[in-house]
Amino acid sequence: MQRHLTLRATIIGIAGLLVITASSMYVALRMGALPWPTIFVTVVSLAALGKAKNSSLQEINVTHTIMSSGAMVAGGLAFTLPGLWMIDPSASFSIPSLIVLAVVGAILGTLFSSLYRKKLIIEEELPYPMGIASYNTLIAGKQGGKGARTLFASMGGSVIFTVLRDGFAKIPALLGIYGGSALFPAFSIWVSPMAMGIGAIIGPLFALVWFGGAIFGYYLLTPIGITQGLFASMAEADIFRSNLGIGLMIGTGLGVFFKAVYSKLTALKKLEDKPQTLSFTSRLLIVLILFFAVILLSLGTELGLVESLVLMAGIYLATYLSGMLTGQTGINPMEIFGILVLLVIQLISKPSLIASFSIAAIVAVACGLTGDVMNDLKSGHLLKTDPRQQILGEGIGGVVGAVLSVFVLLIMKASFGGFGTAELPAPQAAAVAAMVGGLQNIPAFLIGLGLGLVLFLAKLPSATLGLGVYLPIYISSIMGLGALLSVLIKRIFKSKWSKEELGQQSGLVASGLLGGEGITGVAIAIISMLK
């Protein structure tokens, strides 16, 4: 078997990982956002190995897989743990405990991603826009020609646009049409080439379902609810809407769980003698990893044995939802999954404040890494990279990134005097801190839960709908616009190019738009961190 995970791939990948992880921690704490580093590390890996002796696209693919893996681990910690110190600045969290949380989360995220790969990437063929953009970048960069010119022209335009917007403030980040009443609420759109490219890649079905959720939440539910007296204020309507959206996403998770249980029971009832998809050795290895994860969490953190056991099931479902949403939309709300698993555990236990944030953090880390793994596995599947070598590389990078993220987080805490300040506002962590006490509107959550379950069983993208209901309108609107423009352009040029050429060219343009802003966002983060 050809080696895709080579020594030089590992060394180059880890060297890049150190920079990407540190900058990702900074930008997550500073701006409350985390641009996918996928295209940035793809270009860096291509530059480092593209002309190297005996290099292959598969080796480059594994290199950028390692390089990006620490970024989402950093995001999982940055989006959750600072909330602890916002509530209690004197809270003491030992370094070994933090390392255990981060490392266990990284390992579980990698493990469960390997289990979901076949279903989400091969069977369901989810788009995974970042993975497709990475694949297009590698192919165009290696082969050159017309495809490369299209991709890099689009990428260059996106870079220039993003620099003007974020570096020189010459272009507004948001455009809005502001309403003056509940009947005419504000409408805004994110001025983002990356988001438009994601909308084009995921296609009209997912993008318009997503946008439809936003239209329902902001322009039907909210104004009708206020005018009919169901909500006393806009703030109360927003709480209902966001909890409804969360319920829709979690209802999808319940549907996944019930469907899996039903499939197992049906198979047993029919006494089907199907070949096992996993060997005995693989199953034993999974059990051992889960066993040691529970032991490490029980002995090395403030979590109890029961809490750790329930946490394994919670991470299993949360990472599935994370992988599915990332595949459908390119968005990974990792901190939301963290707080929801915490709320479930709070029903059967009374975790301390530190234990509560520990639960949210480990789930967010696992979900963050899952999104990164699945994007990389998508590009690897298209390139025919050996998935075992790629997953091993992701695991190595995830563990290294987990340890590094802990120290970077603590260094930034000491250097800036804490979190929740003008220098490090950590807005996601502040939201997690506000939700640690529980959901603000349980009836809305339960309604969403039921609807999400029903829609999932009806084979409708309920999690994507819930994401539209939950997220700000400006994100959903740009995704819908990107999908509509893609459809419109294909119709305009359908007489000039074949269907295959249209798909290829539109995919390259979308990948360039997506990659250009992603590269620029990471570069600006690195420069800001160094300053």
Image (tube, grey):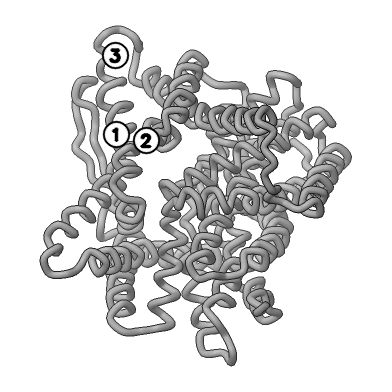
Q: Mark 1 = which residue?
A: 212
Image position, residue 428 (x, y; %):
53, 40
- Residue plotted at (65% across, 40% down): 363
| 388 shown above or below 461 | below
Q: Nearer the viewer, residue 48 or 150?
A: 150
- Residue plotted at (55% across, 76% down): 60
Query: Do tag 1 and tag 3 residues touch (Cβ < 8 Å)?
Result: no
301 with respect to 507 (left or right): right
Image position, residue 365 (x, y; %):
64, 47
Q: Reading the chain from its start, which is encountered first: label 3 or label 2?
A: 3
Q: Mark 2 = which residue?
A: 468
Can residue 77 be seen in this snapshot?
no
Marks 1 and 3 sit apart, C-alpha to C-alpha, by: 20 Å
- Dot 3: few (<14), some (14–19), or many (≥20) neighbours within 10 Å? some
> What residue type is disc 3 on?
Ile
The circle on residue 226 is 3
